[in-house]
Image: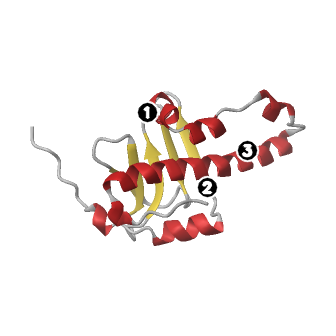
Amino acid sequence: MEMLKALQDINEFKTDRLRELLIRGAPTYVHYGQESDTFRILFVSPETETFVYYLDDDDVALIVGIADSEVVGFHIESFQRRFLPAHAGVKRVWQLSRTDLNRTKDFGDLILQFEKAKRQAAREIVNATREIILEKHRELGFPAYV
């Protein structure tokens, strides 16, 4: 069977906008699909037109803006099955402790805790994903999330 040819080359993608979004702490949109075990993280509005660019045989894919070829997020398959066990930092923030839940006083407090946990998870996921991507695609000059 013939391999599918990518419609766009990874060298055409830009990470300038992602770098800026990570530095200034842009809003983060996350979605986990339990049935499909997929995780998506976006640093732009979910209404932004994007496409998913799969990297080789990895479970990690880039989410790229159609209008400007900027990387604006990540799509991770086999998230709990393979990605979490391979990345201790992500696993640590993914799992809630009883202490975290006991500190919740009301719904507003829950929202604040969620936003804080979401930022921590985003940082860990971006940095773990960065390692995977740079292993094979150093040309992207991928930014770290500090």
Quadrant containing the N terminus in the rendered view? top left
Disc 1 packing (10 Å; few <14; some 14–19; many ≥20): some
Residue carrying label 3: 114
Quadrant containing the C terminus in the rendered view? bottom right
Q: Position of residue 3 (x, y in %)?
A: 14, 44
Q: Earlier in the sequence, mark 1 or mark 2?
A: 2
At label 1, the amino acid type is Ser
- CA–CA distance between discs 1 and 2? 21 Å
Check the image and report above or below for 37 versus 107. above
Task: Tell me the element at label 1.
Answer: loop
Q: Position of residue 89 (x, y in %)?
A: 59, 41
Q: Position of residue 113 (x, y in %)?
A: 78, 44
Residue at the far right: name it.
105
- Say which quarter of the image contains residue 69: bottom left
Does residue 132 appear to the left or right of 91 in the view shown?
left
Does residue 5 appear to the left or right of 106 in the view shown?
left
- Say which quarter of the image contains residue 99: top right
